[in-house]
Image (tube, rainbow, N blue to C red):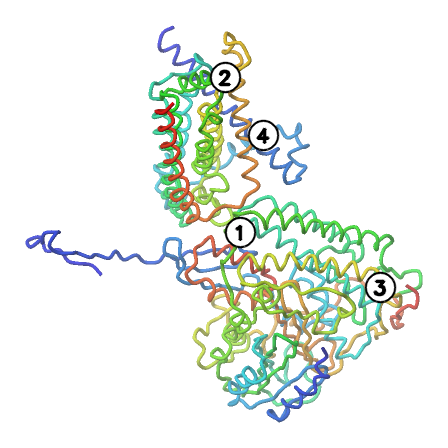
Amino acid sequence: MTTTIDPENLPFISETSVSVEIETEGMTLNIGPQHPSTHGVLRLVAKVDGEQIFNVEPVLGYMHRGYEKLAEVRTYPQITTLVNRIDWVSGFSNEIPFIAATEKLMEVEVPERAKYIRLILTEMARIASHFVFNGAYPLEIGALTPLFYAMEDRERVLDLIESVTGGRFHPNFNRIGGVKPAAGAGPATKKDIQDLPAGFYQETRDSMETILKACDKFEDLVGGNEVFIARTKNIGVLPSEVASAYGVSGPILRASGVKFDLRSTTDYLPYKDFDYEIPTGENGDCYDRWFVRLQEIRESAKIVLQAIDAVPSGPLQAKVPKIIKVPEGECYVRAENPKGEMGYHLISEGGLGPYRLKIRTASFSNISVLPWLLEGVLIPDLLAIMGSFDFVLGDVDR
Amino acid sequence: MSFGLELAIKVGVIAAIAPAMALALTIIEIKGSAYMQRRPGPLHVGLRGLIFPIAEVIKFIQKEDIIPTKADKSVFKWAPAYIFISVFGLFVIIPASPTLIVRDLELGVFYLMAISSFSTIGVLTAGWSSANKYSMMGGLRAAAQLIAYELPLILAVIGVVIQAETMSLVGIVEAQKEWGVPFVIAGQGVAFVIFMVAATAEMMRVPFDMPIGESELVSGFLTEYSGIRFLLFYISEYINLFVMCAIASTLFLGGYHIPLLPVEWVNFYGPLVLIGKTFALAAILILIRWSFPRFREDQLQNIAWKILIPLSLANILVTAVMKVVF
Amino acid sequence: MDQSENTSLLDSLSSNFPSTTNDFDTLKIFVKEDEWVQAATKLKDEYGLSFFSWLSAVDWENDVSVGDPPKENVQPSFEILCCLSDTSDGNFVILSTTIDKTNPIINTLVNVFPGASWHEREAYEMFGISFEGHPNLIKLYLPDGFEGNPLLKSYELLTREVKPWPGEVDVEPMPESDEEIKGDDEQ
């Protein structure tokens, strides 16, 4: 509101109270798509007033690769290769639900040894993904050093994955019916069987022990740092009803207090044989989300230590025909990706490839709650909250 | 000696020392951070890492001079100069020994505070003239932060001035010589901590580097600067670090004075002692930089206004009372 | 827990929603178009399925430009699928309805589940389905000026005009015999 001042009749200031409000408009600030803190090419169009945000609108699609259409023109083994690249930080865990869906429709019985190897590699992928978070999140808050420590520990896990599968980020190790049984692409003869490498068990045990110690170190250095606590406690509180309504899953949902983990409710991998806890948080703020992921690294390391001692012997892949044709049917299989719930809805009409493959990714639903959460926060808090969501653009845009 | 010759010698010496100190501090920073972060590069590559500062300087010099189209060109070009001038101006009063000083002003401390606040203009104009929303936000944050932290800086030093009864820096060091212990032990410990915190904020180092805010504002007010202009900012940041630590060691730690060595040779060991103390303080600040995340501005302002200023006022009160009573 | 073992859930669902199937551990409920929002609300309130997983569509068409057509002839239509889950036991249900291709409109689920907003925007731009009542039905992924709805079966892919499906292998095939791949008995 502005007052008009009449120069002839200026009242004495002591007699009247003039109230003038200075109107300020918001400024539109474009955060991204190239920015050190958005994990990839995410663009947020933010209306800000000084440092405070009115509303935020994410603009997606900078990384859209058209996976669902691509899946309609590929055969099933080819899709296994593609699917690794959705959440590129934990490559192995993206293949699992897809392979499980195909095996379900084909009614193929996966041998126990293959299931255990899959479980070990999935948990290692989970550790790798959470270490990236552990290193990158303090970096966004301003602590420049934990990144290097986290990457060093992550290298141990990646070395283990590489020794088994040959690839660090995109292993492409699953086959329909089991895991890859042979070196190269030729037929599996007795000489060509390539199983777990020599020394794998002992190296895994040593690496997991080191990782457990590293988690203690992180909890002390990062979690005990007063500035870190001041920047993350009570910031970005997400209530559990809102999280469910938006489809937020994974560590974020668990940090809001909901004790829900797909590893314990589904049976695509033998998690029931192992003893592990499901960490939850109390408030649903950024500190809880960080802490839940740190605890998950510990739990995954414990699962791997138990699983390594219990791998049964047996074949690595069930008998499947050479050209894979999945019979008609429709099923939805979901798994616990490190980022959240990842699922594949496979509609097959008996061909060489699916009729329709719907990929449900975790980060897409996770960041759909950001406009609700980011109203009225300051810009540094926006980055703290976004970092704590730990999304990957390949997951969001597919 | 004639005035002109003396002036030329003094300017020459400062012009030689200041960048040398900045380079030395850069080396300490790079190697220190590489040790802490377990990065082997700066520890082994290139003559055990000593080539890095020279390589950086050469890299910056040979870059293209880019000025954004919508930027205010003359202001944009002058902004680094303000900061450069203000940090060089502080070299005038740093005593390397009772005679090795450019000019021992009677109003040493007063001059110090006045000139060091001149750099605020440089930061603000750099942010504003860059025609970039991020730079503007960085510049405004910087203005708020620098103004807020001037006060604890000044108030902390007033305690020292009361205790030494003089504002000239040589006089303060002589007073510490008389006391026998440096002021940090002789009652100004709290003021020392306040001064170091405020100095870190004045230099916009982590944990107070909101204006630069690397992961948020993509370098803040420095975003649009590249090449030699960025080099000016970069070097003045390190010279500022040296100068602030030198002043802190002069005011609180005893400057060029060490109790056991004979006084006649102070012209020889004075500079070395001063540089040693300065580098020790700088090493502590470097350690803190790589260990802490950064504060949000409202937390930053809280610390300045609600914690540091009342503490420094209390310090002045206590010092004055002790001075009168004893 | 295997869904097919949860007979109590299955029974109560079948009593309320007559056409429920449970193949391959996937509970699928068919409803009519006008009961879409009602069914979702009922599942949320009475069955505790308050976690919104995803929403998407399937284009049933006999005449496909890429890929294989369906085995038996289907009536061309859109099938909208919505997956809801609960957050305690891991039960999930896929709600499905069929809408007409010539006039693809359906009510929005945003008032029941706010998370449906982005999923519906994606279905809108990929299939051309409009959601009535959606507050902000604009494109999500595709760049401005993009024409067409990519996930329709009639949408033509340029590279498939050149190479036949499923894509000729670009390298020389490995020298191999035509046996089945056997899983070996040894480790």
Please identify the quarter of the rendering in which residue A395 is found.
Answer: bottom right
Circle 3 packing at 10 Å, graded few (<14), some (14-19), many (20+), is some
Pointer 1 residue:
A229
Which quarter of the rendering shows the N terminus of chain A? bottom left
Mark 3 residue element: loop
Disc 1 residue type?
Ile
Q: Are marks 4 and 1 on the same chain?
A: no
Which quarter of the rendering shows the C terminus of chain A? bottom right
Q: Earlier in the sequence, mark 4 or mark 2?
A: 4
Residue B314: give x, y in percent of width and height: 38, 36
Please identify the quarter of the rendering in which residue A317 is found.
Answer: bottom right
Closest to the observer, A224 or A369 = A224
Residue A358 is at least partly visible in this image: yes
Marks 4 and 1, how far apart at CA: 32 Å
C130 to B155, vertically: above or below: below
Pointer 4 residue:
B27
Residue B250: give x, y in percent of width and height: 46, 23
Circle 4 packing at 10 Å, graded few (<14), some (14-19), many (20+), is some
Mark 4 residue element: helix
Residue C130 is at least partly visible in this image: no
Q: Please give the label number shown on residue B257.
A: 2
Q: Are marks 4 and 3 on the same chain?
A: no
Pointer 3 residue:
A311
| Cβ–Cβ under 8 Å for marks 1 and 2 | no
Q: Are marks 4 and 2 on the same chain?
A: yes
Q: Nearer the viewer, mark 2 or mark 3?
A: 2
Marks 2 and 3, how far apart at CA: 70 Å
Marks 3 and 1, how far apart at CA: 41 Å
